[in-house]
Amino acid sequence: MLSTMKLYNYFRSSASFRVRIALQLKGLNYDYVPVHIAKGEHKKEAYSAVSADLLVPMLETVGERLSQSMAIIEYLDETHPSPPLLPGDALGRAKVRALAQSVACEIHPLNNLRVLKYLVRELKVDEDAKNTWYRHWVREGLEGFERQLMQLPASTYCYGETPTLADCCLVPQIFNAKRFNVNFDGLSRAMAAYEACMALEAFQKAQPSACPDNEP
Amino acid sequence: MLSTMKLYNYFRSSASFRVRIALQLKGLNYDYVPVHIAKGEHKKEAYSAVSADLLVPMLETVGERLSQSMAIIEYLDETHPSPPLLPGDALGRAKVRALAQSVACEIHPLNNLRVLKYLVRELKVDEDAKNTWYRHWVREGLEGFERQLMQLPASTYCYGETPTLADCCLVPQIFNAKRFNVNFDGLSRAMAAYEACMALEAFQKAQPSACPDNEP
């Protein structure tokens, strides 16, 4: 199949990783366009000419440019429904979206590169305090995530027996948190879902080390 | 109509405000259950007995408890489709969700009460630096929001001629940013959408000063 989609992304970006997982789960081909966030390429002219919000990921498809990882994944799910990344009922969708947003609205925004840079450059926070900040929000957020999982029936993935939008968000967050030595004690449901996902080929193919712009 | 929904919320919470707007736009009755976030009531036993993530808003309906404002609004939109808060086509929905997430994932998480408290208590940031932090992320985020609006056809609200999920997120963010004297220069599309929304009865009825727990 000829590739018709183009994903602007960065190997280490947690939000980019979410979309790569969704594309892999759905077996969709795409062109990988690297944008080196750590070098500030997202703020330079080549990218600002195509991106409105100067963030990755951005998906180019059907002549349109879509931003925000969860919006992109919902779009992919609506236009390529199989396999589904959201449950078939409204209540199930609400629960999966809430799990996804617990990561995307409560944890990740506090720990992305531009925020960590602001802490260091503007607030003169030292390395230790920066790492404590990172770990604090990840740990607090994952505890809330775990409590949500505990109210759901037992399942292999976050919600049910197939990966959903919730797993697309959880996996990159845990993956990155491992680099910062976050304490995962007591997060057994979340960690079990993470391990189940990482055993799948789609998640392996989407991970940073499988990206063309990976820096070992 | 007998009220069957219960909204746990806080008058000053921007995320609670989003859901109040959606409920008003759809003409849905609900019981208002105040949770005093500034006094830490969300972390006390009465609330932790019912809430998994210890956050507001939480919607109790059909015997279920739903969290995360955008997930709640999508649920309301699916179960009470009129008037719709998302466009009828996948591309339109992707754009509206991206706008909503630009606020909910890029701006608001950096400026909610627990983060500002952490800056002051843990990082010993002074009042000036705290306010600069607040204004920095709101301004940067709204600039990206405005650039997204500029790529859309002219419209009364964020997207089209009726309020959507994007307006539900934008309005509380601007409303709160006004308290922090954020500079809104050059954000003409966003501000016009804000003003158009605030002229509607639904937004007036949802605003903090109309809440039973409002503190003047």
Image: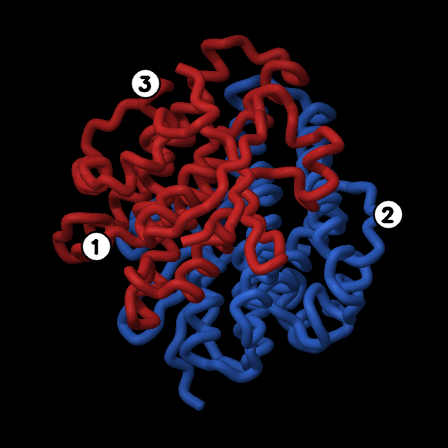
Chain colours: A red, B blue
Residue A88 percent location from the top left of the image: 29, 70
Residue in the picture at 44% in, 34% down: A14
Residue under label 1: A162
| Residue designated by label 2 | B186
Please identify the quarter of the rendering in which residue A103 is found: top left
Kindly identify which chain the residue marked by label 3 belongs to.
A
Label 2 is placed on what type of residue?
Gly
Amino acid on which the number 1 mark rests in the picture: Thr
Kindly identify the residue that appears in the image at 66 percent across and 38 percent down.
Answer: A54
Q: Amino acid at mark 3?
A: Asn
Q: Is residue B166 above or below residue A29?
A: below
| Image quadrant in which you'd find residue B84 | bottom right
The Cα atoms of the two marked residues, 2 and 1, are separated by: 46 Å
The disc placed on residue A147 is none
State which chain disc 1 sits on: A
Residue A108 image position (x, y, % from top left) = 46, 36
Task: Give me the residue at 81% from left, 62% from top.
Answer: B192
Q: In this rendering, is residue B20 above or below B35?
A: below
